[in-house]
Amino acid sequence: MTHNHDWLDTEITALEHAGLRRHLRTVMGAPTGTINLDGRDVVLLGSNNYLGLSTHPEVIAAAVEATQTFGTGASGSRLISGNSEPYTTLEKNLAKAKNTEAALVFSSGYTANTGVIPILAGEGDLILSDALNHASIIDGCRLSRATKKVYRHCDVEHLKDLLSESATFRRRLIVTDGVFSMDGDIAPLPDIYDLAAEYGAMLLVDDAHGFGVLGRDGSGTVAHFGLATENIIQMGTLSKAIGALGGYIAGSRALVDLLINKARGFIFTTGLPPATLAAANAALSVIRSSPELRQRLFSHAKCLKTTLTDLGYTLLPSDTQILPVVLGNPQRATSIADALFAEGVFAPPIRPPAVPPDTSRLRLTVMATHTETEIQQAIDAFATVAQSSVDLYR
């Protein structure tokens, strides 16, 4: 019996023609400010390792020690045999950092969002979601089977209008990114918090890109605004500024207990390697003791943003370490990214469906551990490409 797989080739060809085909690239060595990508040394402007902690000596030492003590793998799901002692320490410190009663670590940020949202809302409930929320939030909403309404990006008045029409629903959940991963802007959390209180809605904040970077001691977006944490459920990841892997939910002890018993993404997956947990815990300590890392991160971001704007590039109004350079169509974004790579800079092109149509971009992210030389190399490359390009937005 033969199978016709021509449709697969057709799908791939269509992606190619639309400028949307993606390829995996191989990174040789550790992800520092300069990496070897497909055999070439380039300045890295496409990393979520914002503080460079994945290569910090204390973080590496903690991972090595945990491996020697606990082995390389968890050996089972957390409810069976995979709940190694480093989980206990990490969750205690995450709850302390987020100023909540408890925290629960998942195997990824994706499974944290798809795990918690269906617990908070189901049939007969309403989820109000920002138009630019992360894909994991969107998928969590779908899995919940709750009614979903999307409010315009960071539009508090639109959110209020939708809430005013929501009286017939059993429960209401507002969910938003703290820092939006593709735009780099910060959600207007104080206004959203007030609306949640006014209408008796729950509030879930995805702090993947704010945790470790914003707020007191890098505690995140909620701390950045000085909001009380009792009525906010905070989600975050250990794979961005923390430099490890995993996701977490921080909130009340009752919520954590319910997630342990009902969240499918928690129950039906193997625990994280002990080395990963120990590395994340060590990274939290470094963040608390090294405020200069955050200061250096934002200094680099400000320098790069100002210089690229002067060179004629169109940047979205980000106040974070994420700098989106908008180029329009996907072919243009890919072409500019290829030209920069030829100049020794990796600036990844971001295209639909990750961003809306006609807003393809380079998503630049700086690192605290970039050297002044590396930042200047990046600026020189962008200057060269700007001089050779007829139109930086098309």
Image: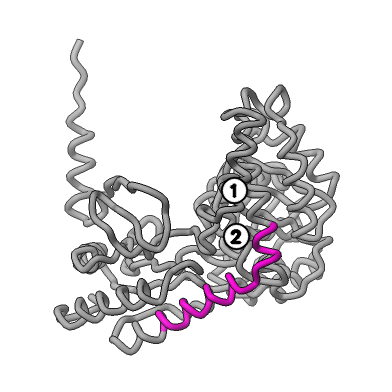
Q: Which mark is residue 364?
A: none
| Residue 297 covered by magenta stretch | yes
Identify residue type, mark 1. Answer: Cys
Kindly state the secondary structure of the residue where label 1 is placed: helix
**Residue 141 shows which numbered tag?**
1
Mark 2 and 1 residues: CB-CB less than 8 Å, in contact? yes
Q: Determine the residue positioned at 62% across, 23% down.
A: 75
For the image, the number of numbered tags is 2
Q: Residue furthest bottom?
A: 310
Name the N-terminal-most of marks 2 and 1. 2
Q: Is residue 120 magenta?
A: no
Does residue 361 sit above or below 19 in this rendering?
below
Q: Residue at x 62, y 62 (%)?
A: 176
- Residue at (21% x, 19% y) in the render: 3
Camera-side residue of 91 and 253:
91
Dot 2 corresponds to which residue? 129
Q: Which residues are magenta?
A: 285-305
Q: Quarter of the image holding residue 223? A: bottom right
Name the quarter where the N terminus is drawn. top left
Q: Residues under labels 2 and 1: Cα distance?
A: 9 Å
- Check disc 2 and give the amino acid type: Ser
Q: Which element carries disc 2, helix, strand or loop?
A: strand
